[in-house]
Amino acid sequence: MRSTAFLALLLSIPALGQQAAHFTMLPGEHWWAGVISQAHLMPFTSESTYQFDFDGNTDGNQGQPLLISDAGRFLWCDEPFAFQIAKGEIHAQSKSAPIVTGVSGATLREVFLHVSRRFFPASGKTPHPSLFLHPQYNTWIELTYNQNQKDVLAYARAIGANRYPKGVLMIDEGWFSHYGNLDFDRARFPDPKAMIGELHDLGLPVMLWVCPYISPDGQFFTELMLDHTRNKKTVWFVNAANPKQPAIMEWWDGFSAVVDFTNPYGRQWFKAQLDRLMKEYGVDGFKFDGGDASYYSAKSMLGPSKAFDPAVSPNGHTEAFSRLGLDYPLNEFRATWKMGGQPLAQRLRDKNHAWADLRMLIPGILNQGIMGYPFTCPDLIGGGEYLSFRDAKTVDEELMVRAAQVHALMPMMQFSAAPWRVLRPENREIARQAALLHEKMGPEILTLARKAAASGEPIVRSLEYQFPNHGYGARTDEFLLGEEILVAPVLEKGATERTVVFPPGRWRGDDGQTIRGPSTQAVQAPLTRLPWWRHMQD
């Protein structure tokens, strides 16, 4: 079918260099776009209706100016563009840069290899191995804005006391006194160096939450203003109406000045604070939050504002912030732009504690991979939206367990809500077994990460990516870890079995049984089981 349509396909492709493009979908064709947070709406087909504009918007997650299809077609633009899908037609329009379209091969894998090598080649580097080898722990759900030395240490000690594997510990938002002043609040952290020393003794590398925003009041801000007045060294966006003042931006935690990382002094100022935290206290790395393109947009600024370089788009400022992470192997990002192929750990956008959001994790990770982001983490186990966890009675224990199982054979898994607090002993043990499985598979996952760093290929792959032309294009509730491991978590409340599509070959399960594909079978999956299989050579 696709070969006979090849001439028509070529005729539908616009010439290089124009700022508009149009595709007519082929029968049975599936498309994916670089809007990671909306991956659960993909793949797009001739029945889909959808529109999105990347200009100043990545919808709270990673963005990539790319569309690709499992018929080998692609669309790329170096700058943000808008596109619409309706009645089997795709229309794209760019305001400022040429749109590049083309065909490479006839499968999703072939076109991905082409676009990744051409537009976002692999760097050859991975984020820090600890992020893959062990589960991660984040203090956000347990402490939210009340990060403090006593409770951070209690959380950390509980990891070992409850026999969970040690791993990276992330101290989340609230360890400082003001945004932008990256030093420990001594009222909450009386001896941060001693705290980090104890965390290291417990076997936990330490990351700190940071963001590119500056509280516009207090002594710290006043001193920055004086430095700007005396030395003309400005770290933030300026106010177009009064260049002597910073522009103030609205974000989820209030109103702040925002650091301009395209300004060398802004980048240098921010980086110097990070380096001091590492040198003075022994901090190992950073969770980079914020930096969304929407917060660099004039729409988020109070009053008229401008960037130092008017040629840089809001998305370009997100990219500049993301590039800071390349200096720190132990990193994590939620919002990035055009950072495919780079050694950055990319987390999915915060999810609610809900079954519908659990079902978004696999599509999200699959889409990250084919957009050039292989080093991925599927949000926090059970969801990262903290309001769901304020009352332990509202926690769905079954959901927490199934979420831990989804994470177990992903490139990274991250706990936040403490299983020992929110789960009964029997469910706590099931979640612990998921963590132990991840640790057991850690060396194999790290090997896959290193291969991805060299080739650019996803660590987590869809069936369509690995086994094209078998009708797997829309299958997004199971995945392959690398080429050999098939994983089919349970994603429905109350389910103790699920239907699994087995690709061609012989597959040996975690239960010891062997199944031959291609086939579709019902598989038993009580709460204690994460169904997975390894491809066996005939």
Image (cartoon, rainbow, N blue to C red):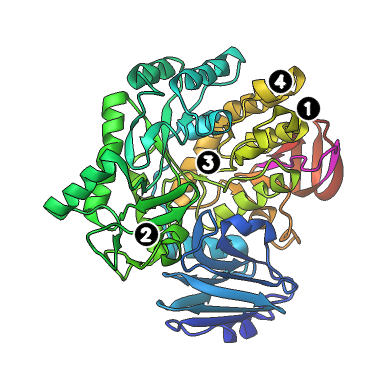
Q: Residues within 10 Å of mark 2 (few under 14, many from 20)?
A: many
At label 2, which amino acid type do we have?
His
For the C terminus, which image quadrant?
top right
Q: Distance between the residues labelled 4 and 2?
A: 44 Å
Mark-to-mark CA distance, 1 and 2:
45 Å
User: Which residue does the numbered mark 1 point to in the structure image?
Assistant: 528
Q: Label 4 crowding class (10 Å Cα cut-off): few <14, some 14-19, many 20+?
A: some
Please give the residue where the numbered disc 4 appears in the rendered image.
Answer: 429
Q: In which quarter of the image is the N terminus?
A: bottom right
Q: State yes or no: discs 1 and 2 in contact (Cβ < 8 Å).
A: no
Label located before the other in sequence (1 or 4): 4
Name the mark nearer the viewer: 1 or 3.
Answer: 1
**Mark 2 vs 3, N-terminal side:** 2
Give the left or right position of residue 498, taking residue 231 as reference: right
- Disc 3 marks a residue whose amino acid type is Leu
- The local secondary structure at tag 2 comes to helix
Pointer 1 or 3: first along the chain: 3
Q: Is mark 3 on a helix, strand or loop?
A: helix
Q: Nearer the viewer, mark 4 or mark 3?
A: 4
- Earlier sequence position, callout 4 versus callout 2: 2
Q: Residue 448 carries which label?
A: 3
Q: In which quarter of the image is residue 206?
A: top left
Identify the residue under disc 2: 317
Residue 138 at x, y percent in the picture: 53, 31
